[in-house]
Image (cartoon, rainbow, N blue to C red):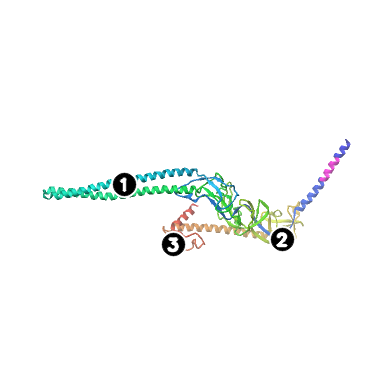
Amino acid sequence: MKKILYISVATVIVVIVALVIFNKVTSGEDLATLEVKVTIGNFEILVTTTGELQAENSKLITAPAELRSRNLRFGQLKIQDLIPEGTVVDSGNYVAQIDRSDADNRLKDMLDELEKEEYDLLKTKLDTTIQLRNLRDELINLEFNVEEMEITLEQSIYEPPATIRQAQINMDKATRAFNQAKKNYKLKVQQAKADMRDAEINLAKRQRQKDEMMNVLDKFTIYAPAPGMLIYHKEWGGEKRKVGSNISPWDLTVATLPDLTSMISKTYINEIDISKIKTGQEVRIGVDAFPEKEYTGKVFEVANIGEQLPNTDAKVFEVVIKVDGTDPILRPSMTTSNQIVTATFNDVIFLPLEAIHVEDSIPFVYKKNGTKQVVILGESNENEIIVEQGLKESDRLLLTIPENPEKFKLQGEELIAVIHEKARQKKLEEEAKKAEVAREAEEKEKRMMEFRELPEGMTREQIQEIMRERGGTRTGRERGSTQPEGERGSTQTEVKKEEKK
């Protein structure tokens, strides 16, 4: 029993000693990590974002363009079959099948309508033939009637004057009726031709619809226009088109064949950082699928107008990054991590942000030698900040507030005036920028007032000439505008839009 007790006590003592030794070791390590040596090097300001690989150029695989025909008037069509994404296809290989059940039913209706139009044309021909034949017979009878009246008139030469006059009247009536009938016959012939033409046009229209429908039905089976790897097409909402998806006559793309030799990373930058992004900036690119790989690229395109992504409240701007070189392992839709280098400073002193402390708007650092050094700060990134004045390369700093900060002697008090002056200059720049924005808004309002006073029907050139004569108001061309010149009506429309805003 005593032996067990001794063993337990010894075990407790060993554990306590081990804990004491461990605490000393770890505390020593912590103290070591709370110091940092000032160094000089290259400093980068980065904007880090996540993107998605896409091919810069792609060949579209689309449903037949005949679906846009005005005669056919197709609506939504469903993808009935589609080969798996990532399939490598050759030119002419089968890709997809569009559901043609609705189109087949419409074709049957067209055939019925075509048959009806053929019957209507035949009926019009028969009716016209019978009607014109009757009119010709009537003309012959009227001509005979005129001859009879002529004979009667000739035979009444020895009759009393009243009888002769009556015969003359009958003769005039018969002649007039015959001439009127000939004119009516010509009109009836023209009317018959118009009816025939109308029936022929309707028949031709139905025939064209039938021919177009039969032609487009043959193209409901879609084949690859070129060799490549098939990638499903993304709709506006971000969803990929697949079996069961609908396509419309105005967006016929079913899939794409990307050119994998030229890749881009499409990403979105928040409205806070977008002012830092410019075309041509260097980018370091990583691919989540291959973490050991590193690529480089450049900012290729920056959107001027922000947008709101689905299911988010933040406003973002689309940025396109072009990947340098080629790599056959890269595929569309792979996730990328992009570090956009927005600025680089060579041979500058920079520190971790944790080493900077602020008191009454004055930044300072704690040196290991027991001094509290005022510093002038420059640009910063996510983790570090440039120190413009106050430190040298050999200084060693504390990353955290020491136990007795009041014992640290303040140094660099002469830099406080520089810090205040720098803050004052920054404030002046901000105020000048606000004034410039207000001045531009005032000029815009002034231009709109001048536009309202101008008479209707004036061209843009005339408006600009009048404004130059009035003086003080710059025209669109003088401000470097690239907007094409238009008529007075378009100018007034722009003014109304500005008023609504």
Dot 3: element: helix
| Left or right: 467 in relation to 227 | left
| Left or right: 447 in relation to 407 | left
| Left or right: 257 in relation to 457 | right
Q: Earlier in the sequence, mark 1 or mark 2?
A: 2
Is 264 one of the magenta-colored residues? no
> Which quadrant of the rendered structure holds the N terminus?
top right
Question: Between 366 and 185, which is closer to the camera in this rendering?
Answer: 185
Residue 379 visible to the viewer: no
Dot 2: element: strand
* Badge number at residue 462: 3
Q: Earlier in the sequence, mark 2 or mark 3?
A: 2
Q: Nearer the viewer, mark 1 or mark 2?
A: 1
Magenta-colored span: 9-18
Query: For the residue marked with disc 3, what is the amino acid?
Result: Gln
Callouts 1 and 3 close, C-beta under 8 Å: no
* Badge number at residue 40: 2
